[in-house]
Amino acid sequence: MLTGMHVAVIGGDARQLEVVRKLIELDAKLTLIGFEQLDHGFMGASKEQIDEVDFSTVDAMILPVPGTNAEGQVETIFSNEKVILTEEILAETPEHCTIFSGISNDYLDQLVKSTNKRLVKLFERDDVAIYNSVPTVEGTIMMVIQHTDITIHDSNVVVLGLGRVGMSVARTFSALGAHVKVGARKSEHIARIKEMGLTPFHLSDLDKEVCDIDVCINTIPHLIVTASVISKMPPHTLIVDLASKPGGTDFRYAEKRGIKALLAPGLPGIVAPKTAGQIVANVMSQLLLEQLQQREENS
């Protein structure tokens, strides 16, 4: 149980509601910031404005999946309040206060560094990424069905990258009957692709591998689907870019060529917010329980 732990949940979307439910279940003391338009009345949680909160008692701070923007503003779906996370706020928190976010940026990294706080980036954890790959794959299937006029079965699909998402995408599209080629750089990834019964190729040969494809699914967060690569694709090709913004595709050139290219980061929160929220809630609650146990052992 998290009895006695004060957690501030700042902004977020429907996924955060699952986090709130889980923490209430574990008896944490919750302060919700940026939720005043939320109709749901959570017993055991108080809604407050950010300038009303006594952050000196906060043991953990939970930010939305994106963290903040480049100016420190926190996304607040359930509020019109402009919430800015500042150095003054973090400096007010206790030394042991941990900040949780899905991802980070230069602003947030600098903020935690200057205030000597610990930042946990949940989406860099293998467990969260692997669990999230399931709704990501389902969302990708949905997009391919919606934006093509052929079946996935017997289609030619290229998947770029064999990370945690790429592996799940490649395996699932193959199971649906697609002819799947997977591009990677590391020799061990090439070996794994072959072991999975799929067709491997080195990313340096990408422009040679897209000449007869129907769908290109990118998971690499760097410009990999360049104008040169897109120029070799058939006109009917669909590109689905799952990498974090700005993606790894030259969207300007794709549009110029008339090739449909969709940037689709954060699919779990779009297609399955409840499941995505439960994934974050379960992992985060375990981390908070470990944090509380460690504090008790050191006290």
Image: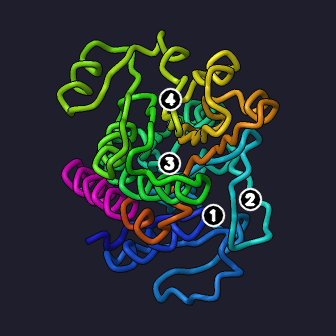
Placement of 212 over or under 259, stated as above or below: above
Residue mark closest to the camera, 1 vs 3: 3
Viewer-proximal residue, 293 or 267? Answer: 267
Mark sitting on residue 220 = 4
C-alpha separation, residue under disc 1 versus residue under disc 3: 13 Å
Residue mark closest to the camera, 2 vs 3: 3
Q: Which residues are magenta?
A: 280-299
Q: Amino acid at mark 4?
A: Ile
Badge 1 density bin: few <14, some 14–19, many ≥20, Cα 10 Å: many
Task: Answer with mark 1 or mark 4, whichever residue precedes in sequence.
Answer: 1
Residue that lies at the very extreme toward the top in this rendered image:
204
Q: Disc 2 designates what residue?
A: 83
Q: Secondary structure at mark 2?
A: strand
Q: Are marks 1 and 4 in contact (CB under 8 Å)?
A: no
Task: Answer with mark 1 or mark 3, whichever residue precedes in sequence.
Answer: 1
Q: Amino acid at mark 2?
A: Val
Q: Amino acid at mark 1?
A: Gly
C-alpha separation, residue under disc 4 versus residue under disc 2: 31 Å
Residue in the image at 73% along x and 64% along y: 51
Q: Amino acid at mark 3?
A: Gly
Q: Disc 3 designates what residue?
A: 102
Q: Secondary structure at mark 1?
A: loop
- What type of secondary structure mainly makes up the magenta span? helix
Q: Secondary structure at mark 3?
A: loop
Quadrant for residue 55, please give it. bottom right
